[in-house]
Amino acid sequence: MVSKDLLEILRCPYCVSGETRKPGPDPGRLELVHDCWLVCQEPDCGRKYPIRDDIPVMLIEEGDKWINVAVEDLPVPPPSE
Ligand SMILES: [Zn+2]
């Protein structure tokens, strides 16, 4: 189980970095779904980050893979690489 404290500070790396940083004081907030996915809450992002072996995989390339997958269609548990 990933700690609530950790989840509270994690943000979507795409939405907090460089030129793709979203506006607002706290962009890239994530919602935990299925207890094993972190879904970016920015409306035009759609990236989803798997939690594998209790470790959130916060890589933009990883989030990219799941942009077009609906939240309800995310595999549980996330596939291992
Ligand atoms: Zn994002």
Image (cartoon, grey):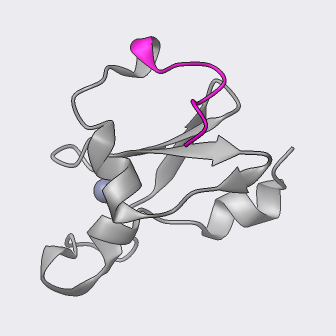
* Residue 59 visible in this rendered orientation of the protein: yes
- Left/right placement of residue 72 relative to residue 8 reads left
Is the magenta region chiefly helix, strand or loop?
loop
Say which quadrant the C terminus sits in.
Answer: top right
Residue 4 shown in magenta: no
| Outermost top residue | 72
Q: Measured from the top left, where is residue 57 in percent x and y?
A: 57, 57
Q: Measured from the top left, where is residue 32 in percent x and y?
A: 60, 38
Q: Measured from the top left, where is residue 24 in percent x and y?
A: 27, 72
Q: Quadrant of residue 79?
A: top right
Q: Residue, x 21% and y 87% (percent of image)?
A: 18
* Residue 27 visible in this rendered orientation of the protein: no
- Left/right placement of residue 31 relative to residue 46 reads right
Q: Quadrant of residue 26?
A: bottom left
Quarter of the displayed picture in which ligand 1 can be seen: bottom left
Q: Nearer the viewer, residue 5 or 79?
A: 79
User: In the rendered image of this protein, does residue 44 appear above or below residue 18?
Assistant: above
The magenta span reads 73-81
User: In the rendered image of this protein, does residue 66 appear above or below residue 76?
Assistant: below
Q: Measured from the top left, where is residue 31 in percent x and y?
A: 53, 42
Q: Residue, x 79% and y 46% (percent of image)?
A: 53
- Left/right placement of residue 74 relative to residue 19 reads right
Q: Residue, x 35% and y 77% (percent of image)?
A: 25
